Image (cartoon, rainbow, N blue to C red):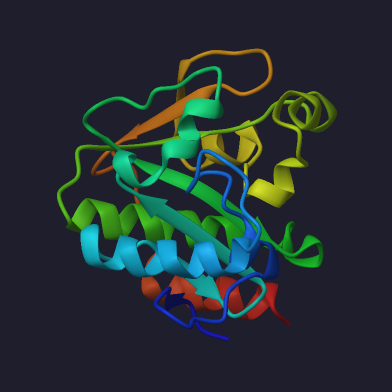
Amino acid sequence: MPLETVHEGSVIHPLAAKSVFWELKTTVSDPAFEKEAWISAALILFGECGFSIADKATIFFCSRDLAPGVAKMPTAPLSEDAVFLSSIFINPECALRGLDTVLVDAAIMNLSSRNFPAVEAFGYRDHNEARALLGSKPAFIGLPPVESLESAGFSVIRDHPITPRLRLELPPKFDLLTAAAAEDLLAQALA
């Protein structure tokens, strides 16, 4: 299963296909329809907005204006110069296999090649506290653990005991996975 750019009609992680926490300020009756509409709009207004490894793992990123749900976070708003790494969805059986590294590196390479100065994301420190604060399990909205973001080079720029905001200056000052290394990691993770 290769890493593919998200487009209209893409096969994506099942939770990613119906989570609109970041994309909308309010709840809706048909989140899957709204997510597909958001993907279409993001592709037109922002360009590439995510990557997917079939239905196993999906990452989304976008401009600040395409993520009004950010206002729900206690460490909002995003910095004016940053794009938003909004969500990472990974099947539980694949979570410890490095798929998050492949997805985050793909997003960082994409955003760096498009000359964005920085990318920001929210993370959580404690699963139960994050669930109580946000009204949803972190996995249901694609909120990654702080440790995952820090291991990808992000640093906390606005701290919070539960959901800090993190930032990575682009291009990063460290090496990213090469295409061959990403393919090897994918093959191992999905074996």
Q: Judge left or right: residue 58 versus residue 67.
A: right
Q: Kindly tell me whether residue 110 is visible in this rendering.
A: yes
Asked whether 43 or 117 is in front, the reply is: 43
Extreme residue in the front direction: 29
Rendered location of residue 157, percent (x, y): 42, 18
The answer to whether residue 87 is above or below residue 146 is below
Tell me if residue 98 can be seen.
Answer: no
Residue at image point 36% right, 70% down? 40
Q: Residue at x 59, y 80 (%)?
A: 54
What residue is at 46 percent from the left and 28 percent from the top?
A: 166
Q: Where does the image place residue 55, in percent across and percent down from the top left?
A: 65, 77
Residue extending furthest toward the right: 128
Give x and y (percent) for residue 15.
68, 62
Residue closer to the observer: 46 or 148: 46
Point out the image quarter for the N terminus. bottom right
* Along the viewing direction, whichever of 47 and 20 lies nearer the viewer: 20
- Classify residue 5 by image quadrant: bottom left
Specify the quadrant of the image occupied by residue 13: bottom right
Task: Report the residue at 31% width, 58% height from top.
Answer: 109
Which quadrant, please, contains the C terminus? bottom right
Q: How many marks?
A: 0
Which residue is at the far left? Answer: 115
Where residue 89 sits in the image (x, y, percent)? 63, 58
